[in-house]
Image: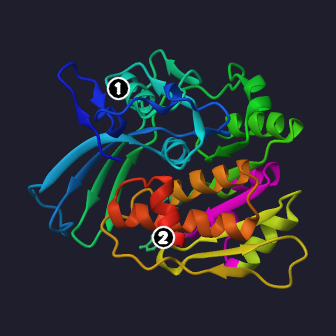
Amino acid sequence: MRAAIGAGGAWRGAAGRGSLPRIMTGSLGKPLVICLGNVVADHTFRVEDIPQPPAKIAARSYSIGPGGMAANAAIAALRLGGRAAFWGRVGDDLNGEPLAAALAAEGVDVTGLRRVPGGRTPVGAVLVDPRGERTIISFRGSGLGTDPGWLPLDKLKGAGALCCDPRWPEGVAAAAAAARAAGVPVVLDGERSETRILVDLVPRVDHAIFSVTGLANFAPGCSPEEGLRRAIASGPVKVAAVTQGEKGVLWLVPGAAKAERIPAFPVEATNTTGAGDVFHGAYALAMAERMPVDQAMRFAAAAGALRARDGATPDRAMVEALLA
Ligand SMILES: Nc1ncnc2c1ncn2[C@@H]1O[C@H](COP(=O)(O)OP(=O)(O)OP(=O)(O)O)[C@@H](O)[C@H]1O
Ligand SMILES: [Mg+2]
């Protein structure tokens, strides 16, 4: 996601370049995807090389904008044709309010984004080299509180899917329970986390979709397929999957003899940051649209590939063109 800092210090998101937030353009009837978890002020530097040993280097370009798993997933669900709401927390520091404004400018409903007094907003420094490979330094925020008591859980009744990342486990536990009670499918981005957090969260969700590192954290020492089996066995999980970058996705359903693989769409990657987040937003939207799982995997893989190719979140027409 690209954005720029405006004169008043607020960021102008991509949707701010002339288009109206979609929430105002006849979005009723589109399924709502609620994304809960992390929003990060991503500072992205394009560099020739990521130096070793440490050195002083000039960046070719710089941008600032909203990142974070759940926030990127919300933007993806929206661009791909849904409505999106973001539930999470920022601090009342210099980064918090512009992040909220940038998400709102994209059309994401931010009434469930809390500004926590005295909190520090999560921040990332993203270094991208000419091959699209990246190094990320992240600060996960502090003083944001863990109590999910203020979440507007009743809104889940009107949602088509809930998409969570593991950065606010108490929030996931509360929202996933309410979603399940309302019959709303829950998708987890099983990203890099402490083992105990993933082991606690996976049985609470319907679709546990890991990154390679996240699956290794969930099931240390297991092969990918064994890790997915362990996720399925841990609770009423309907689908377990691992996204493997340009190797595509491996996924498993209960009772299946073998995991299935969806190959990645071949693209020339320029910036792979957020491909996994976009995959999850697309997959959650597909669940909200009641797409069959194999179709949802292809839809999400196409969205992830376009994000890796362009460094920007695609719209529905672009994904459908690639699928065709
Ligand atoms: N270089 C690529 N070429 C084609 N498809 C890609 C590429 N990178 C990612 N994708 C697609 O997006 C999906 C998610 O990407 P990936 O597995 O890299 O996520 P991740 O490890 O969670 O990373 P992050 O969360 O930082 O984006 C992949 O399974 C694949 O379908
Ligand atoms: Mg990821």
Q: Is the CB–ligand 1 distance for label 1 below 8 Å? A: no
| Residue 44: image location, x then y, percent | 27, 50
Amino acid type, callout 1:
Pro
Pick whichever, 307 or 233, lies toward us: 307
- When the figure is inspected, residue 75 is found, relative to residue 259, above or below; the finding is above
The residue shown at (58%, 25%) is: 145
| Residue 278: image location, x then y, percent | 51, 55
Q: Residue furthest bottom?
A: 257
CA–CA distance between discs 1 and 2? 33 Å
Q: Is residue 303 visible?
A: no
Q: Which residue is mark 1?
A: 98
Q: In which quadrant of the rendered view does residue 102 lie?
A: top left
Q: In which quadrant of the rendered view does residue 96 lie?
A: top left
Q: Pointer 1: residues within 10 angstroms few (<14), some, or many (20+)? A: many
Q: Pointer 2: residues within 10 angstroms few (<14), some, or many (20+)? A: some
Q: In which quadrant of the rendered view does residue 41 lie?
A: top left
Q: Is 219 inside the magenta-drawn segment? A: yes
In screen coordinates, is 224 left or right of 72?
Answer: right
Labels in figure, total? 2
Q: Which residue is mark 2?
A: 322
Amino acid type, callout 2:
Leu
Q: Is 296 inside the magenta-drawn segment? A: no
Magenta segment boundaries in residue numbering? 198-224
